[in-house]
Image (cartoon, rainbow, N blue to C red):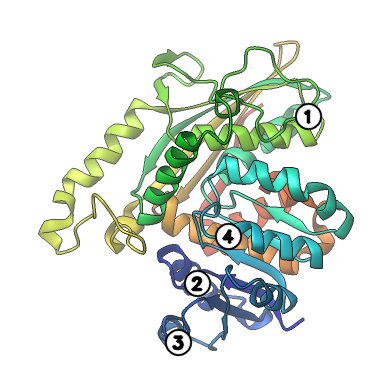
Amino acid sequence: MDHDIVLFGATGFTGKLVAEYLASHPSRTSFSWAIAGRSSEKLAALQSSLAGAAPEIIVADTADKPSIDAIVSKARVVLTTAGPFSKYGGDVVVEACVKQGRHYADLSGEYWFQRAMIDRFHEEAQRTGAKIVHSAGVDSIPSDLGTQLAIEQLEQRGEKAAHVKALFTAYAGSFSGGTNQTLQSLEQLRESGQYDAAFYDDPYVLAPSAEGKVEGETITGWDETRFDHDFGKLGMPFFMAPINARNVRRSLALSGRLPCSYAEGVSLGALLKAGWLWMSRGFGYFVGAPIPLSPKSGQGPPEWLRRAGKFRVVLKATSATGEHTTTVEVQGRGDPGYLATSKMLGEVGLCLALDGDELPAGGGVLTPALALGSVLRKRLAAVESGEFMRFRVLSG
């Protein structure tokens, strides 16, 4: 094993952000890492742009399985940003990690890809000890770890959670060409007829055999605009909730916490603030850094927006008796989908590579909460002396 971390897809928009984060990490001398991808020229350009010790370059392509087997054999952990994962051979990387017992994390928001990995590799990953961690960015770390924290507060008082609801009160950021491609791949999948309609409408699609499913649960649990008295805000359906809620329900199912319903929305105020962020900078044209409204692959938000972005989600868990509640907050700085996500994925990789003795035991196709839990919460809360992400118990 040559490296603690191999970053695959390193020359893409988000991959470069992850590489820059690892290269400048305060503990960069305590881990070894490499960058991997299809183009040696692009990898060399990225390597030369990074400060500090240069990571090794490894050329690999998912169309060439032996090359993927080779990079996995060199790694304790493989991080990949080469999405959409269902389109660009993400299963090849997962399969190699599972067979060799190496850990893996990605930024997949593709629940159809995640379900396929669960069906094909969960049991084998349990045998080999490989932790396969999907959605290791803003989807779905804040929702998943926030729910876990809220429920733990109830359990410390001997109570079981029956309901959790989450409201994003801030979500200011943008999107990249990779996000566009993911949305297009979902539409193509629907048109292909590969799955029936029930698959797309299943709130437990990532926990298909779970016991204790909540009857009548919907995909997001927050399907209409309504004033929520608990949060004191007008909440609306949230475009990230279809993947976040499904990941949270997998965490609930595999940790034995069902039945427990989950609902996730976004406040009107959050959307207005996000719109104001864009408008106040004139879409970037007045500062020479426009936001691409129809980004191509490899494109994403300009630096000013990556730094100006932020997110905040408040989660309330209610006990089965209805007598006890707890409210927690997760907030972070930086464009949620890119600057913040790149830091999250980097810390997930370091957590898997360096914190193994502290992590929950066992492998499988897992969520961030199941694979890393409180160890990742602690690590994220320490980034930039606590100025990047915060996990706080507000009440209960």
Residue 395, how many percent across, how many down?
Answer: 61, 28
Near-viewer residue (381 or 102): 102
- Between the C-alphas of marks 4 and 2, the distance is 15 Å
- Between the C-alphas of marks 3 and 2, the distance is 11 Å
The answer to whether residue 85 is left or right of residue 364 is: left
Near-viewer residue (281 or 299): 299
Near-viewer residue (353 or 38): 38
Q: Residues within 10 Å of mark 4 (few under 14, many from 20)?
A: some
- Quadrant including the C terminus: top right
Q: Viewer-nearest of labels 4 and 2?
A: 4
Q: Assess whether mark 3 and mark 1 are in contact (beta carbons under 8 angstroms).
A: no
- Between the C-alphas of marks 1 and 3, the distance is 46 Å
Judging by the rendered image, the residue that carries numbered circle 1 is 209
Judging by the rendered image, the residue that carries numbered circle 4 is 89
The answer to whether residue 39 is left or right of residue 201 is: left
Judging by the rendered image, the residue that carries numbered circle 2 is 10
